[in-house]
Image (cartoon, helix red, strand yellow):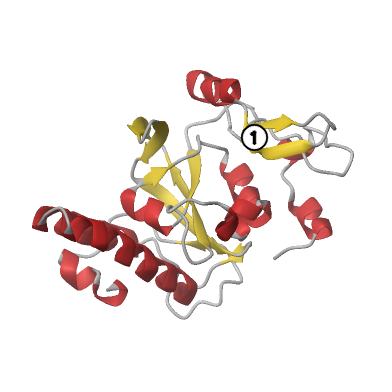
Amino acid sequence: MKTKEELRRIMPERIRMLGHDAIGNPLLYFAERGANGLMNYRAVRAEAVDRCITHGLCYICGQPLGRNKAFLTGPVGALRQIAIDPPCHRGCAVFAAQACPYFTAPRLRPDAMLTNNACCVWTTRSFTSLPIDNAIHYHLGKPIEVTWFSQGEPASHEQVLRAMQSALRILLDVARDDSEAAVNAVLQSVARLRQYMPAEGGHGNQPATAPRGEGGGNSPRQAAGGCQ
């Protein structure tokens, strides 16, 4: 995990321009300020979320988004193509993946979307809002790229594979209680996502972005083989 000094060096200019509180925490668009004037990143401003979706603003910096939208999610969310937070600029999302404790230490976030200390920045040009369990989630369109991180650093193939194995167990346990069709849908999601994993044998010293375009023609069960 990066030090505060390292995080200051990699902070995008969009976030730097927001200013900071008395202890140096950036004044992120979505978050409340406590009575003491310090940022409380656990408290999300509902009006900020509404404005992000209505006006096409970045969830993190509050500035307008372009064609590309980046979402932060974990292995379960990536397999389901679901995120729980609104879209961001890619640079803002990459910074959050390296700086935010909810993503660098996901045990702090009681969220099944995150498992095994891995998260990804899913960049796409399309998404839809989706009500799930009395909350708004976001169904992610086909990715332009998927960049993986583990504990605030670029993730290796092995780290993402372990995280995917945990995620697959969670989703298959639920699917087997439902139907064979549900199981097949989970396996198909693995087949789609495998092409967006870091290259095998990589050391994770650079963000692991998969090649664009469709993958090969393996069957869902063949493609999921390494993750079962």
Q: Quadrant of the C terminus?
A: bottom left
Graded by Cα atoms within 10 Å as few (under 14), some (14 to 19) or many (20 or more), the crowding at tag 1 reads few
Q: Is residue 109 above or below residue 217?
A: above
**Residue 136 image-quadrant placement:** top left
Q: As drawn, which residue projects farthest toward the right? A: 22
Reading the image, the residue beneath label 1 is: 43
Query: x and y percent of residue 101 in the render?
Result: 65, 54
Query: x and y percent of residue 160 in the render?
Result: 45, 69
Q: Is residue 32 above or below residue 186?
A: above
Of residues 83 and 213, the one drawn nearer to the viewer in this rendering? 83
Query: x and y percent of residue 137 in the render?
Result: 40, 36
Relative horizontal placement of residue 80, taking residue 149 as reference (left or right): left
Query: x and y percent of residue 95 in the render?
Result: 65, 50
Residue visible at 81% across and 57% down? Answer: 4
Relative horizontal placement of residue 178, taking residue 16 as reference (left or right): left
- Regarding residue 212, the answer to whether it shows in the image is no
Relative horizontal placement of residue 55, taking residue 45 as reference (left or right): left
**Residue 40 image-quadrant placement:** top right
Identity, as a three-letter code, of the amino acid under mark 1: Ala
Of residues 70 and 83, the one drawn nearer to the viewer in this rendering? 83
Residue visible at 46% across and 45% down? Answer: 123
Q: Quadrant of the N terminus?
A: bottom right
Total marks shown come to 1
Q: As drawn, which residue projects farthest toward the bottom? A: 201
